Amino acid sequence: MPAISAYASSKLILLGEHAVVYGEPAIAIPFFGLKMRAMIEPLIGSPSGTIHIFAPSLGLNHDLQNLSEDNLVAKSIILTLASLGIVQNPTCKISIFADVPLSSGLGGSAAIAIVIMRALSAFLGHPLKQDMLNHLAFQTETLMHGTPSGIDNTVIVYEKPIYFVKGKEVEFITPAGPFTFLVADSGVKKSTASTVQQVANNRQTDSDYYNTLIRQIGDCSRRGKSALEEGNAVSLGEVLNEDQSLLEQMNLSCPELDNLINHAKQAGALGAKLTGGGKGGHMLTLVEESDIENVRSALWEAGATQVYQAKLSASEKHA
Ligand code: PMV
């Protein structure tokens, strides 16, 4: 079997994170600026059926049999083999290289699962179809986050902007862009499972307040979809700001994110908000072409540990 390589993009949630867990719509786009990559090659000289995993950024240099079944990498391999009906493990080495930081709101766990599933199924000569890949990656997301909405795995599998409602067929959006976003890392790591749990707990103790905020976030996604389809950057910027204010009221921001968001707005951004699980991780900001460099400098000055650029264009092609 020849060596195979594959990649999976990361993703940006433009609007609707957390509310999407409770049935409200959310909008996400794939982000090709940061990717997970995997390479699979035959393993010569090892006992038959050995799958060796080399993933330096995950701290892994192990055979599959030495990983617990609920390890994300192990689970992704096991689910792929089971879905293809393979009972005898192939003898191979899986190397995983991660540009996408984990626990930072960019869909890192879904991207790891998807890149492994893509590479392994292709290595075995039966590349998984997108629907099956999405179904399997939802299972690994459940293992990682407990009650995922499924938005991360869906946008990363289909690699198109999506308007997503949990449990419903995915709707693809064609933005009448171009829209340019800068994406900045706050440097604070926070697991999505913990912020999802925080919202669940708070919603239980203060259900009217939280349900109202959740519905209002859903409304931001509905209006954001129209703004994207109309190519209206000013209106999209306003909705991003409104969503951020609702997320702050849900206690999902943090001083580092607030600082980045405020600096971006002061430097002329049309809108700015956290993206993903919150309480750390990344923020995104919508900028007009003429303000890109001002806002980029403001983000670095405000303590961003990384700044990336993402463009969403009318043709759906973006980077
Ligand atoms: O932090 P991320 O990249 O895993 O995004 C989480 C998005 C949430 O809406 C907070 C959770 C979910 O399952 O949709």
Image (spheres, grey):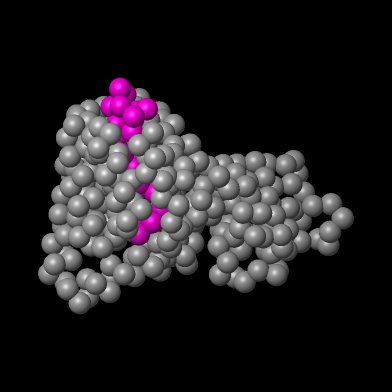
| Region in magenta | 274-295
* In this rendering, position of residue 8 left or right of residue 38: left
* In this rendering, position of residue 291 left or right of residue 106: left
Q: Where, by quadrant of the figure, is residue 265 drawn?
A: top left
Question: Looking at the image, can residue 202 be seen?
Answer: yes
Q: Is residue 191 magenta?
A: no
Residue depicted at 62% across the width and 47% down the height:
97
In the orientation shown, which residue stands out farthest toward the top? 290
Count of numbered circles on the image: 0
Please provide percent x and percent y for residue 60.
67, 60
Please provide percent x and percent y for residue 105.
41, 52
Q: Nearer the viewer, residue 116 or 84?
A: 116
* In this rendering, position of residue 20 left or right of residue 217: right
Please provide percent x and percent y for residue 252.
29, 60
Question: Looking at the image, can residue 183 be seen?
Answer: no
Q: Where, by quadrant of the figure, is residue 189 drawn?
A: bottom left
* In this rendering, position of residue 42 left or right of residue 25: right
Q: Where, by quadrant of the figure, is residue 79 drawn?
A: bottom right
In the orientation shown, which residue stands out farthest toward the front? 301
Please provide percent x and percent y for residue 233.
22, 31
